[in-house]
């Protein structure tokens, strides 16, 4: 009998503990930072996308989110940062975060912050672009260029189309283009357009060979420019022209291809899927991409196989926090203002 009562007592204790955990108040989050990868440790070594936020904010607390492989970090003032992992894994991680009962994300702002390839026609390595549009280029038909019909500019074209540069359909696959809240993007850009981004002789030498690209030769700067997402890495003059055409096609001429990355299309797709639930506010999403390499070689040259330069990659990592951190700091510092009302235009 005594053993029976002990078992009952232990069961009640466990049940009380589980009930307490279930009733624990979710951690309120003001700003979510989504980075896609880190190199080595989160602090003290060669920094990737995550480390500048961890050290620069700083984000002193660790928390494990089921479904997110890398440990997340957060601060007492309401900033949460995750490493989503790259390409297809980014979808899983962002969905896991949204579905977790550990956080209250209903009023959170999102900053997708990472490096990208930059079109030298639009900007230079080390520059930072706030996206107005994110365009998906994964649902696509492809024909080997050696087999494509005469007169085609490339062998990539829309689903349910019969030739390049015709908008097809992607029903059941993707929305294809996501428009970021223009007022919020304009506000973020106004807040950061004068941020001084570091330059160096090494970056100057990498830019100098782009003689036919004035924007690509500029010292690093902040701009508004749109992001193209593909899970595959691509490079080259012909593919860059395809990317320009693709962004124009799917934004009905309103967008300008600036940055190419592997995750934004997946992240925006997941955020859209969960927006109707009220768990997140889709209007409070920002995408900031920084140039770590050019999307093509200088005219008449080839950069393969040396697409990346350590100096350029470092500049891209550095710019993510230098620019994105300004916006995050403003939101957190004046949360009494921005919790209820999303900023617009040049308002502060």
Image (tube, helix red, strand yellow):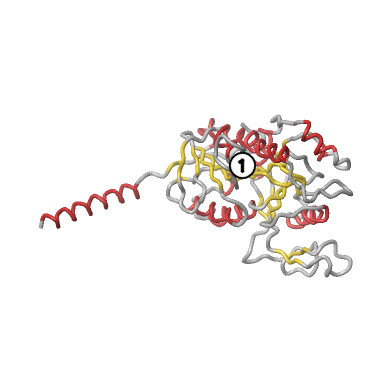
Residue at image point 69% right, 30% down? 195
Is 111 situated above or below 143? Answer: above
Residue at image point 16% right, 53% down? 6
Secondary structure at badge 1 equals loop
Q: Position of residue 85 (x, y in %)?
A: 58, 50
Could one spot residue 312 in this view of the protein?
yes
Number of dots carrying numbers: 1
Q: Where is residue 293 in the image (x, y as percent from the top left)?
A: 74, 44
Residue 172 figure quarter: bottom right
Residue at image point 51% right, 35% down? 59
Q: Where, quadrant-wise, is the C terminus in this rendering? A: top right
Is 180 situated above or below 337? Answer: below
Q: Position of residue 21 (x, y in %)?
A: 34, 48
Density class for disc 1 (Cα within 10 Å; few <14, some 14-19, many ≥20) is many
Residue 1 figure quarter: bottom left
Could one spot residue 278 in this view of the protein?
no
Residue identifier under label 1: 49
Q: Position of residue 49 (x, y in %)?
A: 61, 42
Q: In the image, 222: left or right of 19?
A: right
Residue at image point 55% right, 33% down? 57
Q: In the image, 254: left or right of 12?
A: right
């Amino acid at each position: 009998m005594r053993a029976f009562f002990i078992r009952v007592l232990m069961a009640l204790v466990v049940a009380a503990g589980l009930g307490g955990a279930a009733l624990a108040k979710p951690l309120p989050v003001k700003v979510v930072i989504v980075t896609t990868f880190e190199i080595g440790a989160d602090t003290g070594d060669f920094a990737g996308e995550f480390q500048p936020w961890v050290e620069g904010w700083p984000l002193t607390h660790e928390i494990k989110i089921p479904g997110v492989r890398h440990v997340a970090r957060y601060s007492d003032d309401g900033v949460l940062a995750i490493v989503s992992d790259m390409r297809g894994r980014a979808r899983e991680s962002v969905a896991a975060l949204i579905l977790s009962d550990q956080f209250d994300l209903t009023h959170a702002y999102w900053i997708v912050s990472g490096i990208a390839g930059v079109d030298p026609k639009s900007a230079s390595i080390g520059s930072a672009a706030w996206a107005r549009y994110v365009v998906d280029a994964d649902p696509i038909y492809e024909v080997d260029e050696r087999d494509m019909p005469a007169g085609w500019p490339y062998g990539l074209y829309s689903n349910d189309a019969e030739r390049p540069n015709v908008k097809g359909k992607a029903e059941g696959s993707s929305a294809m283009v996501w428009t970021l809240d223009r007022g919020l993007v304009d506000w973020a850009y106004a807040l950061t357009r004068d941020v001084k981004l570091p330059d160096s002789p090494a970056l100057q030498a990498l830019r100098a060979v782009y003689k036919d690209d004035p924007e690509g030769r500029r010292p690093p700067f902040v701009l508004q420019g749109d992001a193209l997402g593909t899970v595959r890495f691509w490079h080259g003059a012909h593919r860059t022209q395809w990317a320009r055409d693709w962004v124009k096609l799917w934004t009905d001429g309103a967008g300008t291809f600036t940055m190419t990355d592997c995750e934004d299309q997946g992240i925006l797709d997941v955020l859209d899927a969960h927006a109707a639930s009220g768990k997140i506010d889709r209007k409070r999403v920002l995408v900031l991409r920084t140039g770590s390499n050019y999307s093509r070689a200088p005219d008449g040259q080839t950069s393969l196989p040396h697409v990346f330069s350590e100096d350029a990659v470092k500049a891209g990592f550095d710019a993510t926090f230098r620019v994105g951190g300004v916006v995050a700091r403003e939101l957190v510092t004046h949360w009494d203002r921005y919790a209820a009302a999303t900023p617009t235009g040049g308002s502060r």
